[in-house]
Amino acid sequence: MKMIKFLLSVATVLVSQAVFSQQLVIQITQGVSNPIPIAVVPFEWQGFGVLPENITGVVTSDLKNSGEFAPIPEKNMLGTPHQEKDVYYRDWRFLGSDYLLIGRITRSADSALIQVQYELFDVVNQKRMVGEVISGTEAQLRDISHQISDVVYEKILHVRGAFATKILYITSQRISDTVTHYQLNLADADGGRAQVLLNSKEPIMSPAWSPDASQIAYVSFESGRSQIYVQNLSTGAREQLTNFTNSSNSSPAWSPDGTKMAMVLSKDGNPDVYVMDLRTRQLRKITTNIAVDTEPSWMKDGKSLLYTSDQGGANRPQIYQISLETGWNERVTFDGTFNAKAAMLPDGKNMILVHRAEVSDDFHVAIMNLERGSISTLTDSALDESPTIAPNGRMIMYSSKVGDHAILNAVSINGRIKYQLPVKDGDVREPAWSPFLD
């Protein structure tokens, strides 16, 4: 219940602002060739009135939008069981469904809490796989839906689901030749319930999550120059973390234990990577060369950083790794004319980055195996940038260009599943996928 309570507190703060972002809607552009057939029977509502959220619809959309599942249309169903005794496996085998999800929703007359009971069945082997009762308020029904989707995903694919996570992203809309409106937005991982955390007439950049998802960091130009801010999601309280004059302050990245933040500062005249102790605010300079060093990200053990630098010359940025203990610095990428914005996958063996093979090529999201040094391109869209990894390591979300607009795209780490999250008006950039919320 920790995740539900956290999301409710966040929603309460944001709704009180009465400012809502434009909605992102997933559009599947490519799925697996043989998605898993599953039947999600409409959950039975045993209360009065109409619920504000369609749990069946959310779960069905989650599974379909993952690209891994093919939900059976409701109109084709031969029955609508809501408990195990009413399940006839032959009906679902006839429809070609491998799995069956059923459920009931109840609310007692003297309680504001709603109970959602669900059960997942393996049709092929004719057995019940899992069942659970989750309680929450009406405001938490969407969170409960995503939790159910996560359980189904994990039980069938043996990988933890990430439907109950969140994303940050930046939208910009040109109002006139001289005015552009910027927003920092928070939404469900599927783009639902989008809400605005910050409105500004000045650019906002580089949103980043704390490891416990209680805080976010970002760069704002609201003071007239770039500064790093930290915001508490439960209270809405903001704190300006940097205030160096005549300096660029950018690329915040929390350490895995949440006690430090890597950032890029040019306060000494050259853009270098620094690490700040968030308890003492003490700064430590990490890189000292004359090149432009930027986009730091942490290795999983918190002992070293990946970063982008053109220290190799020829104005061709590459990825480097530096040890925080010894200062040992080594180049990681050698294939291609441009490699930037690196981030490690949860497996600790593979790295996501923005890659360009030749000078005449487009920028694409790619995956690199650190042991072999091999780079494989995952995307074929235009001007791909700012990749962010789902906490289960299965999907990468990134920004790219479609016509004159920037939109969000997502691709699986094997390149087999792709979808878009366009916004109706304006541009959407710089997504940041949250950690797991429990």
Image (tube, rainbow, N blue to C red):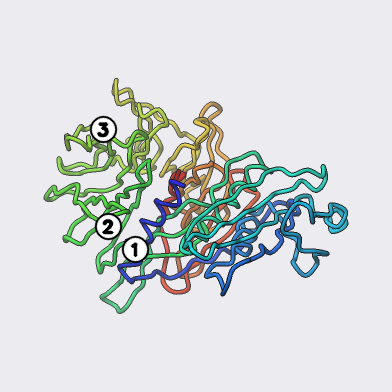
Considering every residue shown, the one lying at the far top of the view is 326
Considering every residue shown, the one lying at the far bottom of the view is 176
- Secondary structure of residue under mark 3: loop
Residue 400 in sight here = no
> What residue is at 56 percent from the left and 28 percent from the top?
372
- Residue on which the image places disc 2: 236
Q: Amino acid type of disc 1?
A: Leu
Q: Position of residue 39 (x, y in %)?
A: 74, 57
Q: Amino acid type of disc 2?
A: Gly
Q: Nearer the viewer, residue 347 or 386?
A: 347
For the residues bearing labels 1 and 3, Cβ distance under 8 angstroms:
no
For the residues bearing labels 1 and 2, Cβ distance under 8 angstroms:
yes
Please state which of the two labelled residues, at mark 1 or mark 3, is closer to the viewer. 1
Q: Position of residue 364 (x, y in %)?
A: 51, 50
Q: Position of residue 116 (x, y in %)?
A: 59, 56
Considering every residue shown, the one lying at the far front of the view is 110
The answer to which of marks 1 and 2 sits earlier in the sequence is 1
Q: What's the CA distance linking mark 1 and mark 3?
A: 38 Å
Q: What's the CA distance linking mark 3 and mark 2?
A: 33 Å
> Residue 14 has which mark?
1
Q: Left or right of 275: which side holds 419?
A: right
Q: Position of residue 169 (x, y in %)?
A: 40, 58
Q: Amino acid type of disc 3?
A: Thr
The answer to which of marks 1 and 3 sits earlier in the sequence is 1
| Label 2 neighbour load within 10 Å: few <14, some 14-19, many 20+ | some
> What residue is at 22 percent from the left and 38 percent from the top?
278
Q: What's the CA distance linking mark 1 and mark 2?
A: 8 Å
Q: Left or right of 261: which side holds 317?
A: right
